[in-house]
Image (cartoon, rainbow, N blue to C red):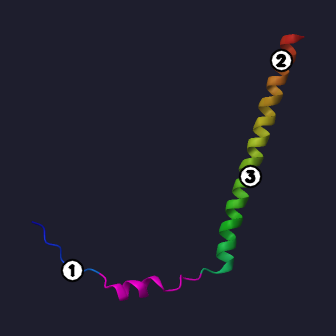
Amino acid sequence: MLKFSTQFSISPSKQSAKMLQRPERIPFVVRAKEKFFTGGFLGLMLLVMAVWMYFLGSIFLNLVVWLFS
């Protein structure tokens, strides 16, 4: 039979006090830098994908024109 030790359990009053603590404040500059970096990366990836689709589309169009000419 297993015996569970209550020596490491957190009492309900300590647990609720632990949950009510304010989260650590992160400076606005750090948060903005993360968001701008992520947004810039996603924007760049969208631009690269659009250029890649344009490139493939132009190659396909040239192939179709060459086949039917």
Compared with 30, 15 (above or below) is below
Q: Are marks 2 and 1 in contact (CB under 8 Å)?
A: no
Label 2 or label 1, whichever comes before in sequence order: 1
Would residue 21 be found to the left or right of residue 27 on screen?
left
Q: Are marks 1 and 3 in contact (CB under 8 Å)?
A: no
Q: Given the image, on which type of amino acid does mark 2 rest?
A: Val
Q: Residue drawn at (83%, 17%), measured in percent from left and top? A: 64
Compared with 62, 52 (above or below) is below
- Measure how far apart labels 1 and 3 are at the Cα level: 54 Å
> Badge 3: how crowded within 10 Å, few (<14), some, or many (20+)?
few
Compared with 61, 32 (above or below) is below
Q: Residue furthest left?
A: 1
Label 2 or label 3, whichever comes before in sequence order: 3
Quadrant in which residue 4 is drawn: bottom left
Element under label 1?
loop
Q: Residue drawn at (81%, 35%), measured in percent from left and top? A: 54
> Badge 2: how crowded within 10 Å, few (<14), some, or many (20+)?
few
Element under label 3?
helix
Q: Given the image, on which type of amino acid does mark 3 rest?
A: Leu
- Measure how far apart labels 2 and 3 are at the Cα level: 30 Å
Q: Position of residue 63 (x, y in %)?
A: 81, 19
Specify the segment rendered in magenta.
10-25
Q: Given the image, on which type of amino acid does mark 1 rest?
A: Thr
Q: Nearer the viewer, mark 1 or mark 3?
A: 1
On whether residue 66 falls in the magenta region, the answer is no
Q: Position of residue 32 (x, y in %)?
A: 69, 72
Q: Which residue is mark 1?
A: 6
Q: Which residue is mark 2?
A: 64
